[in-house]
Image (spheres, rainbow, N blue to C red):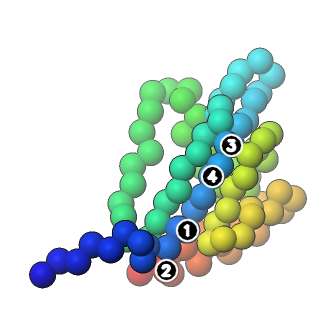
Amino acid sequence: MKHNNLESLMVVVYLRNVTKIFGDFHAVHDLSFSISTGIMYEFLGPNSAGKTTTIHMIMDIIMADRGDIEILGKEVHRRYGIASVTCLKNVDSIAR
């Protein structure tokens, strides 16, 4: 018997009201979502929809202009890109 208990899923990636602007171009505007363990996700959209920009903000390669990004309950460090690599390794180990 399959048991789906969504309340027991742990949120590993959480974005709240994230915005990134390059000059006059809004690459990402007020984006909010969460990714939990045990669920497969797709990140789809047309060219210039902000997919890569969002991934780069999650990985701390570029900074969001506004909003909050958390990985495993900890805010993405906004100064050092390498901090997120450790977080993503932890996400990978939880997924296994």
Residue type at mark 1: give it.
Val
Q: How far separated are the C-alphas under marks 3 and 2? A: 25 Å
Q: Secondary structure at mark 1?
A: strand
Q: How far separated are the C-alphas under marks 3 and 4? A: 6 Å
Residue type at mark 2: give it.
Ile
Q: Is residue 96 visible?
A: yes
Work out which quarter of the rendered image holds the N terminus and state it. bottom left
Q: Which residue is mark 3?
A: 18
Residue type at mark 3: give it.
Val
Q: Are marks 2 and 1 in contact (CB under 8 Å)?
A: yes
- Residue 19: x and y, percent? 71, 37
Q: Which residue is mark 1?
A: 12
Q: Residue at x 42, y 39 (%)?
A: 44
Crowd around label 1: few <14 · some 14–19 · many ≥20 (10 Å): many
Q: Give the left or right position of residue 69, taking residue 37 as reference.
A: right
Q: Which residue is mark 4?
A: 15
Q: Are marks 3 and 4 in contact (CB under 8 Å)?
A: yes
Crowd around label 4: few <14 · some 14–19 · many ≥20 (10 Å): many
Query: Is 45 drawn above or below residue 92 in the view shown?
Result: above
Q: Earlier in the sequence, mark 2 or mark 1?
A: 1
